[in-house]
Image (spheres, grey):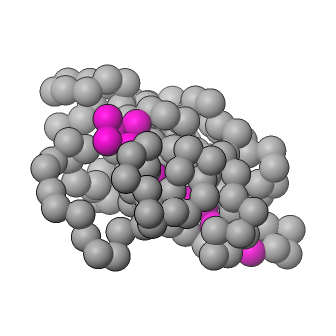
C-alpha cells in the first residue's frame, strides 16, 4: 500500500511539472544558457550547442553542486554536474537517461539530492514514458532507479 501511495505521489509530481514541447519552434531568448557536449558553458556556440532548460543547486557531502540539463536541437538531453557557476563541469554518468528524450525533471520533495526524471522512449503520440529517480547524494557515483510504473505521454 505504501509503495503504491509513493508511486501515485511521484506520478502526480511528474504530471504537474510539464515542460514545453521538444520541437516547438521558438526564437532564442537573450537569457538562454548554452553548453557544449562536455557541459561547459559557452554563449558563443553557433552549432553543437545544448540549451539549458533545467538547473538545480544541491548540497552533497558538505559541497555545493549544480545539476543541469541541456537540450540539443534534435531533442536529446545532456545531463551535467558541476560546482557552482559551471566550475569543473562534467557529463553525468547515468547512461539510462543521457541523450534521451526527457519530458520532465523535478526535484524529489523528500530528498534534496534526488530528482525525478521522465524519459520518453521515442518521439510522437503514444510514446511510452519511463520514470526514474536519480540520486546524487554521491555526485561521482549517481544512482538511477526505475520506478515500477509507466505513464504514457499525452
Residue 113 found in image quarter: bottom right
Most prominent secondary structure in the magenta stretch? strand
65 falls in the magenta region: yes
Q: Residue at x 17, y 37 (%)?
A: 154
**Which residue is situated farthest in the right direction here?**
61
Confirm whether residue 143 shows in the render: yes
Q: Residue at x 62, y 30 (%)?
A: 95
| Looking at the image, residue 110 lies above or below residue 131 | below
In front here: 152 or 123?
A: 123
In front here: 8 or 2?
A: 8
Q: Is residue 40 left or right of residue 119?
A: right
Confirm whether residue 65 shows in the render: no
Locate residue 127, reporting x and y percent. Answer: 26, 24
Locate residue 123, reporting x and y percent. Answer: 26, 27
| Looking at the image, residue 70 lies above or below residue 31 | above
Q: Is residue 86 left or right of residue 78?
A: right
| Looking at the image, residue 9 lies above or below residue 62 | above
User: In the image, which residues are magenta?
Assistant: 64-76
Locate residue 50, reporting x and y percent. Answer: 43, 50
**Number of numbered discs visible in the structure rendering:** 0
94 falls in the magenta region: no
Locate residue 132, reporting x and y percent. Answer: 53, 39
In front here: 111 or 123?
A: 123
Residue 54 found in image quarter: bottom left
Amino acid at each position: 500500500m505504501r509503495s503504491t501511495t509513493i508511486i501515485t505521489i511521484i506520478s502526480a509530481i511528474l504530471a504537474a511539472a510539464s515542460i514545453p514541447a521538444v520541437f516547438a519552434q521558438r526564437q532564442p531568448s537573450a537569457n538562454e544558457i548554452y553548453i557544449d557536449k562536455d557541459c561547459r558553458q559557452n554563449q558563443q556556440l553557433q552549432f553543437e550547442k545544448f540549451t539549458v532548460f533545467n538547473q538545480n543547486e544541491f548540497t552533497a557531502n558538505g559541497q555545493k553542486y549544480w545539476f543541469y540539463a541541456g537540450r540539443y536541437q534534435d531533442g536529446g538531453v545532456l545531463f551535467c554536474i558541476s560546482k557552482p557557476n559551471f566550475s569543473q563541469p562534467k557529463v553525468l554518468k547515468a547512461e539510462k537517461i543521457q541523450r534521451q528524450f526527457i519530458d520532465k525533471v523535478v526535484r524529489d520533495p523528500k530528498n534534496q539530492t534526488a530528482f525525478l526524471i521522465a524519459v520518453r522512449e521515442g518521439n510522437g503520440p503514444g510514446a511510452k514514458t519511463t520514470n526514474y529517480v536519480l540520486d546524487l547524494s554521491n555526485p561521482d557515483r549517481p544512482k538511477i532507479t526505475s520506478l515500477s510504473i509507466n505513464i504514457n505521454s499525452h
